[in-house]
Image (cartoon, coloured by chain):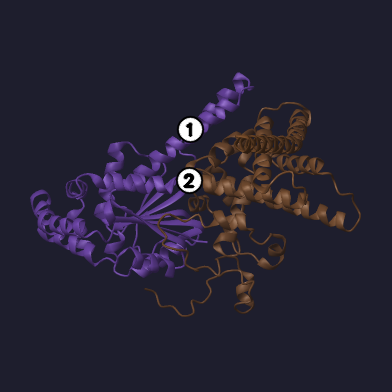
Amino acid sequence: VYQVFESVAKKYDVMNDSMSLGIHRVWKDILVHKMNPSPGTLLLDVAGGTGDIAFRFINYVRSVRERQLQRRLRHHQNLSWQEIAESYQEDKFKSLGDSQVVVCDINKEMLKAGKQKAQDLGYSEGLSWVLGNAEELPFDDDKFDVYTIAFGIRNVTRIDLALEEAYRVLKPGGRFLCLEFSHVSNPLISRLYDLYSFQVIPVLGEVIAGDWKSYQYLVESIRRFPPQEEFKAMIEDAGFFKVDYQNLSFGIVAIHSGFKL
Amino acid sequence: VRCQLTPPQRPLQTSAVLRRVSDEQKKEPLASSSQQEFDSHPADHQPEQEPQGPRPSYTGQGGQESEDYESEEQLQHRILTAALEFVPEHGWSAEAIAEGAKTLGLSAAAAGMFHGDGSELVLHFVSQCNTKLSELLEQEQKLVQLGKAEKKPTDQFLRDAVEARLRMLIPYIEKWPQALSILLLPHNIPSSLNLLTSMVDDIWHYAGDQSTDFNWYTRRAVLTGVYNTTELVMMQDSSPDFEDTWRFLENRVADAMNMGNTANQVQSTGEAVVQGLMGAAVTVSNAESGWVVRA
């Protein structure tokens, strides 16, 4: 698995776009919307290599924070100019409202690519990059508000361990969110999807990234991953409550959510 | 398909969340039917509620342990109750719920368990108010039965009940218009309507009115109308301690009582008319037969 991603790291984003016809962006947007993070949230994005989720999180929190500040200003109608000036200054320093993202990945190359992307796009505050294994996270217990893993968990050898680690590092009340390829139940869509996966994707892999094998592996790993209900049961086994899932694109992708209560 | 025979009852984690249910539970009213109604507000994709968390075993299910831990629903209720304190500042919203969760020692992410629009918070509050009202009326009834208080005449009873119920809105009155609009959202209407009708039924039940001036449907409709209009008036009332609202209420209840008399009058007038018609018909038929005989 490590080698797959070493070679894939640089072209990861391009491949994602071409494989999913750009829809992966929508999927990731939906994930962050579902999360609905409030300023002050501490997010752990595992297997988040190139930072897609992290950047979306930061954007979301920033806009929520802006709205909050606007609302607060509207209510402060009787302040003196001095007080207003002070509140502007103080809020400038907290445009993220203390929210933070820790991006954790097992692969150095992916992290490097992510850091570079962050620099290019201008994301500086609230981001950290940590090398780590999802089955054995280098973090203390009860630390994070939200744990996300987008298109990463199917690459983990022992999924149950990863789920247990997720449970461990989350605060009480914290949320587990997983965005992953899943099972299509509609037979027609299923046939089309299979066709696309096995015929088109490896070809794209060869053409764009010069790597047929890795993308063949990708498609196969998708097929091997447990379907929605089974994965839900696994999440419950790890100790999460109120576990449910939302199918996106007919089940090609699903978001599973659970809470540590 | 999971075949777990005895899932060891999974208690909700950590001391921050988990609570000895025994003490608190006695005070919390057993979920009234209206509460149950909106509790099974399904997460859209859950096929059905799996009994995952241990249920409070009122039926003495398991050993000692199962009685001591609370279920997900109870925790959700606690979060919503805690969230109420933040409504004046944040409105009926996910933010208020997040703040509520934080006071219980939970991460703000726990607010993700609820709808993003604050629906559950409003419904929870309304249900709580209704329960409080029932308890109040129950206590009053007991006093009357014990002879310690006089039985109020119907109109007084209705006025007091509606006033007591509306007064519960006072701490949240600024954000109440927002709550009303949430209650009117299509996906909330079944629940909110249900809560409203059961409250109205409750009030009539304790009013113990046995008169036959109204029939059951009319009574319900009349009181619902009185309640709703008074509520709306209250939204815009700026008089000290809402005296204008209570006066409006008094007038509406008086109207409602008079309506009963009008209905009676209409009925007797109707009867008179019918009798008149009958009489005319008989006369005509007699006259006709008279004609025939003559001819």
Residue A58: % across, % down: 39, 41
- From the viewer's side, name the closer residue of A57 and A81: A57
> Which residue is the site of mark 2?
B187
- Numbered disc 1: what chain? A
Quadrant including the N terminus of chain A: bottom left
| Image x and y of residue B79, in percent | 59, 53
Residue A102 appears in the picture as rendered: yes
* Chain letter matching colour brown: B
- Please indicate whether residue B146 sits to the left or right of residue B281 in the image: right
Seen at 77% across and 51% down, the residue is B210
Residue at 66% in and 66% down: B21
Q: Nearer the viewer, residue A103 or A216?
A: A216
Question: How far across and how far down the image is residue B30, in percent?
Answer: 66, 62
Q: Colour of chain A?
A: purple
Q: How many marks?
A: 2
Instruction: Please tell me whether mark 2 sits on a helix, a strand or a loop.
Output: helix
Rounded to the nearest whole Å, what is the CA distance between mark 2 and mark 1?
A: 27 Å
Q: Are marks 2 and 1 in contact (CB under 8 Å)?
A: no
- Relative to A79, does residue A232 appear above or below in the rendering? below
Q: Which residue type carries mark 2? A: His
- How many residues crowd mark 1 within 10 Å: few (<14), some (14–19), many (20+)? few
Question: What residue does disc 1 label?
Answer: A67
Is residue B136 visible in the rendered structure shown here?
A: no
Q: Nearer the viewer, residue A67 or B231?
A: B231
Marked residue chain, label 2? B
Residue A201 location, quadrant: bottom left
- Amino acid at the residue labelled 1: Arg
Residue at the extreme top: A81
- Labels 2 and 1 share a subunit: no
Q: Is residue B203 above or below residue B271?
A: below
Left or right: B4 as drawn, with respect to A172? left
